[in-house]
Image (cartoon, grey):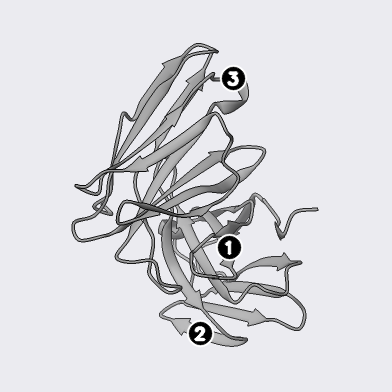
Amino acid sequence: QKEVEQDPGPLSVPEGAIVSLNCTYSNSAFQYFMWYRQYSRKGPELLMYTYSSGNKEDGRFTAQVDKSSKYISLFIRDSQPSDSATYLCAMNTYQGAQKLVFGQGTRLTINP
Amino acid sequence: DSGVTQTPKHLITATGQRVTLRCSPRSGDLSVYWYQQSLDQGLQFLIQYYNGEERAKGNILERFSAQQFPDLHSELNLSSLELGDSALYFCASSVAAGATDTQYFGPGTRLTVL
């Protein structure tokens, strides 16, 4: 069983919809949680970073962490075609180094 | 553009061969990370260097090695290549090695082993 599980999709939604992306994890030592976005043929780029349980909002994006359930989510409001990409969750325990553990990634398509 | 550069963009080689991938971090960044991305394993952390010293190791095979030079660029050496080593290899850099330092990824090197 992988430490981080993420539904690979693909997920296809109409423009303007609210998108929910999720990851579950098994290692209770994970403290830092991130969401990366990866466009086709590009490297991942950091979207959101959270440390504790709760919500963090940045524009149309909201990251949610529930440590008790070992579950993290990314919500995208008013989705745009430019949001079409693969979204990867990542997390780490940080014991002196960022050894990120990534989910498989969810491929998202926003249809105009 | 993240500011991290990787060369070459594509590499095609044969089993048993040895290749070197190169990464130049963003100006001012001291940490360099290497990742492997394949369809079946996803994105996996290989190794991190900070200011020339190895800082952390992940799922890096013994056939693979890396180093960071005094000018902070890094090289990932892959030897005795196997078909299963075909993947995208990403380099990332961050300003330091702290828990919240953002990693900026390069465009990757696509390695194909025939």
Q: Mark 3 belongs to which amino acid?
A: Glu
The disc numbered 2 marks a residue on which chain?
A: A
Q: Which residue is mark 3?
A: B82
**Is B90 rendered above or below residue A52?**
above
Tag 3's secondary structure?
loop
Residues at badges 2 and 3 in contact (C-beta under 8 Å)? no
Q: Which mark is residue A89?
A: 1
Q: Mark 1 belongs to which amino acid?
A: Cys
Horizontal relation, residue A22 to residue A15: left or right? right
Picture quadrant of residue B5: top left
Picture quadrant of residue B66: top left
Q: Nearer the viewer, residue B111 or B65?
A: B65
Q: Position of residue A58 (x, y in %)?
A: 42, 80
Q: Are marks 1 and 2 on the same chain?
A: yes
Q: CA distance from mark 3 to mark 1?
A: 29 Å
Tag 2's secondary structure?
strand
Q: Decide which of tag 1 and tag 2 comes sooner along the chain.
A: 2
Q: Position of residue B8 (x, y in %)?
A: 31, 28
Q: CA distance from mark 2 to mark 3?
A: 43 Å
Q: Residue furthest bottom?
A: A54
Residue sitting at x 52%, y 18% = B113
Q: Position of residue A102 (x, y in %)?
A: 59, 56
**Is B83 rendered above or below residue B60?**
above
Tag 1's secondary structure?
strand
Q: Nearer the viewer, residue A22 or B70?
A: B70
Q: Mark 2 belongs to which amino acid?
A: Lys
Q: Which residue is mark 2?
A: A56
Q: Nearer the viewer, residue B37 or A29?
A: A29
